[in-house]
């Protein structure tokens, strides 16, 4: 049925539910599972409104990349705890929906399992959710949880 499953993961409840379904699907199909956490390059406005912890000096992109790595590794740890052996986690920067689609094409995923609502920004309320965009742009099936 499926041999390669992509789960975009942002740490939200919706993403955790999607990860659970993806784990079940991977077990059922004997598929490999890949987790993708996407962070956005910050704008000057976001940088001016952001608060960086004093104990973590550095530019905002480095802080966001570090947080994204933690989120991806957290998701991978859930998979390992559930007994999945074939799981990898990746972190990419860019617009969430387009980055997910590009990653799925480059890695030849058979299906994308995504949460219906994540930790999106105000922009998502105005322009539509990431899951909605992914379903419209993907060449492979998308399971929205």
Image (spheres, rainbow, N blue to C red):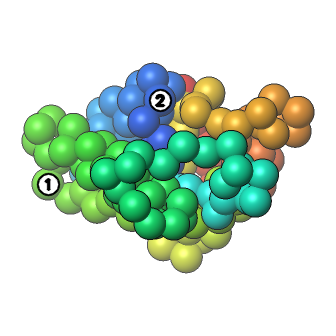
> Within the image, what quadrant is residue 142 found in?
top right
Say which label, 1 or 2, has the lower sequence index.
Answer: 2
User: Image height check: is 122 above or below 74?
Assistant: above
Q: Nearer the viewer, mark 1 or mark 2?
A: 2
Nearest the camera: 10 or 143? 10
Residue neighbourhood size for the residue with mark 1, other residues' Cα within 10 Å, grouped as few (<14), some (14–19), many (≥20): few
Q: Secondary structure at mark 1?
A: loop
Nearest the camera: 105 or 128? 128
Q: Residue tagged by mark 2?
A: 12
| Any part of residue 65 in sight | yes
Horizontal side of residue 96 vs 112, given as left or right: right
Residue at the image position 70 percent from the left and 37 percent from the top: 121
Residue at the image position 31 percent from the left and 51 percent from the top: 55
Image coords of residue 64 (percent x, y): 48, 56
Image coords of residue 25 (percent x, y): 35, 38
Image quadrant where one finds the C terminus: top right
For this orientation, the residue located farthest to the front is 54
Horizontal side of residue 56 vs 102, given as left or right: left
Nearest the camera: 81 or 71? 71
> Within the image, what quadrant is residue 66 found in?
bottom left
| Any part of residue 33 in sight | no
In the image, which disc is placed on residue 53? none
In the image, which disc is placed on residue 85? 1
| Mark 1 vs 2: CB contact within 8 A | no
Image coords of residue 137 (percent x, y): 77, 55
Image coords of residue 14 (percent x, y): 50, 26
Q: CA distance from mark 1 to mark 2?
A: 23 Å
Nearest the camera: 71 or 102? 71
User: Image height check: is 115 above or below 33?
Assistant: above
């Amino acid at each position: 049925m499926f041999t390669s499953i992509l789960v975009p993961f942002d740490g939200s409840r919706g993403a955790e539910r999607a990860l659970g379904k993806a784990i079940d699907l991977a077990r059922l199909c004997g598929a490999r599972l890949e987790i993708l956490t996407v962070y956005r390059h910050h704008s000057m406005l976001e940088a001016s409104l952001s608060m960086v912890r004093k104990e973590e000096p550095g530019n905002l992109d480095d802080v966001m990349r570090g947080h994204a790595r933690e989120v991806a590794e957290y998701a991978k740890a859930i998979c390992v705890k559930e007994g999945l052996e074939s799981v990898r986690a990746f972190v990419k920067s860019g617009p969430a929906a387009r980055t997910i689609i590009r990653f799925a094409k480059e890695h030849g995923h058979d299906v994308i399992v995504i949460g219906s609502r994540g930790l999106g920004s105000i922009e998502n309320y105005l322009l539509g959710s990431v899951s909605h965009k992914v379903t419209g742009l993907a060449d492979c099936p998308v399971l929205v949880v």
